[in-house]
Image (cartoon, rainbow, N blue to C red):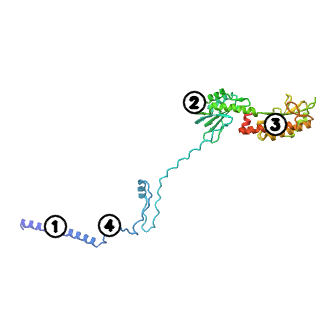
């Protein structure tokens, strides 16, 4: 065979092989297309979106309106419910906290204490006022002729208290009150100015606010109060004296006053007290020697005196009647006489005259708003 024939035979063989390979590729291609055509037809994506199946479509999950990041995070974490499961409960999502209600305002402090009828008031205001800052001022104020009261409203409290300068207490308000008058007269301008200066020095040192009543108006009130005190400041004395040159039998006196409820006090007088411990009336020796448990057997006296401090006694008319009854009994039991301060015998008419005077005094005190035996009266007539 020639070389030409051999070359042609090789080319023919290659051509046959190429045709076989091409036919095999085509056969596999057509087989895949046939299998695909015989399989289940694919669902229409548009139809599935518009008409979902109840068996396969999960129930929608209700999500409360919260921040977008939180919703997405919880939606990713929540597992999908199985197709046949009942409709699940909406997932529990954290609600945004509602705006907090504003804190209630602190209650207003109670009114600063003051006895308008008989006092001049100075107020000191600040956030936290140390009580110790007023120690020196309180000490110097004791030299004034009229009583001064120092009271404070502690931090966090609604109750006023007496200022404790030696303590570590702190106050939001302090009130200093000067009594305008007493039995020794009315306060004067110099004393009022002294107290203002003492308080102002402390207030300026601590950068505190200070408020005070009008000084001129207070001085006028002091003068009016003093005139009123002069009109009603009455002390009634009833005396039981021995007849002739005899001495009064003190053993009888002690027996009768003790039976009437009077007790011997430290000052050597017998006193009848009310339930507050205030004296209703007292009995003293007319001589200079006070009574004492050890001297009754040896002591001799010409007489004793029953004393009734009119403006300091509540229900004064009843107490006066009680004292008159005791005086009459003492005179009868001791063989003495019941007389007035001028050593004149006290008759029923004389007793009734005193009673009428008491009615007038007590009416005047009530009209002034300073009833006898009241706390105010006890302070003024001390």
Distance in Å between CA atoms under marks 4 and 2: 87 Å
Residue depth check, mark 1 versus mark 3: number of the one nearer the observer: 3
Residue depth check, mark 4 versus mark 3: number of the one nearer the observer: 3
43 or 60: nearer the eye?
60
Whichever of callouts 4 and 2 sits on the residue coming sooner in the sequence is 4
Distance in Å between CA atoms under marks 1 and 2: 118 Å
Distance in Å between CA atoms under marks 4 and 1: 46 Å
Residue highlighted by disc 3: 281
On screen, residue 95 versus residue 57, left or right, reads right
258 or 147: nearer the eye?
147
Distance in Å between CA atoms under marks 3 and 2: 49 Å
Residue highlighted by disc 4: 46
Residue highlighted by disc 2: 204
- The residue lying at 9 percent from left, 67 percent from top is 8
On screen, residue 273 versus residue 211, left or right, reads right
- The image's mark for residue 18 is 1
> Circle 3: is it few (<14), some (14-19), or many (20+) Cα within 10 Å?
many
202 or 70: nearer the eye?
202
For numbered disc 3, what is the local secondary structure? strand
Residue depth check, mark 3 versus mark 2: number of the one nearer the observer: 3
Does the rendering let one see residue 262?
A: no
Residue 212: give x, y in percent of width and height: 61, 33
- The residue lying at 61 percent from left, 37 percent from top is 173
On-image quarter of the C terminus:
top right
Whichever of callouts 1 and 3 sits on the residue coming sooner in the sequence is 1
For numbered disc 2, what is the local secondary structure? helix
Distance in Å between CA atoms under marks 4 and 3: 113 Å
202 or 327: nearer the eye?
327
């Amino acid at each position: 065979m020639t070389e030409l024939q051999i070359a042609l035979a090789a080319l023919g063989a290659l051509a046959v092989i190429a045709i076989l390979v091409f036919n095999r590729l085509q056969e596999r291609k057509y087989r895949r297309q046939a299998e695909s055509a015989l399989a289940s037809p694919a669902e229409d994506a548009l139809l599935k979106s518009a008409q979902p199946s109840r068996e396969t479509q999960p129930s929608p999950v209700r999500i409360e309106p919260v921040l977008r990041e939180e919703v997405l995070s919880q939606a990713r974490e929540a597992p999908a419910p199985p197709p046949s499961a009942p409709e699940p409960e909406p997932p529990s999502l954290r609600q945004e906290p509602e705006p907090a209600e504003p804190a209630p305002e602190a209650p207003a402090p109670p009114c600063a204490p003051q006895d308008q009828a008989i006092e001049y008031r100075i107020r000191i205001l600040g956030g936290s006022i140390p009580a110790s800052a007023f120690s020196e001022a309180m000490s110097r104020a004791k030299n004034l002729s009229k009583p001064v009261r120092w009271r404070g409203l502690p931090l966090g409290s609604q109750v006023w208290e007496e200022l404790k300068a030696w303590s570590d207490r702190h106050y939001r308000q302090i009130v200093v009150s000067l009594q305008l008058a007493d039995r020794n007269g009315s306060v004067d301008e110099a004393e009022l100015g002294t107290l203002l200066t003492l308080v102002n020095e402390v207030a300026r040192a601590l950068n505190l606010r200070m408020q005070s009543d009008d000084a001129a108006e207070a001085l006028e009130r002091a003068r009016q109060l003093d005139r009123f005190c002069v009109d009603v400041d009455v002390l009634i004395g009833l005396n039981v004296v021995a007849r002739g040159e005899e001495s009064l039998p003190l053993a009888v006196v002690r027996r009768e006053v003790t039976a009437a409820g009077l007790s011997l006090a430290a000052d050597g007088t017998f006193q009848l007290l009310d339930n507050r411990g205030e004296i209703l009336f007292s009995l003293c020796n007319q001589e200079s020697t006070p009574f004492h448990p050890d001297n009754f057997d040896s002591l001799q006296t010409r007489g004793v005196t029953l004393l009734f401090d009119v403006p300091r006694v509540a229900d004064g008319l009843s107490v006066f009647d009680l004292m008159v009854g005791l005086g009459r009994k003492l005179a009868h039991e001791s063989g003495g006489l019941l007389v007035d301060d001028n050593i004149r015998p006290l008759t029923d008419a004389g007793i009734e005259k005193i009673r009428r005077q008491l009615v007038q005094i007590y009416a005047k005190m009530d009209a002034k708003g300073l009833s006898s035996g009241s706390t105010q009266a006890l302070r003024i007539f001390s």
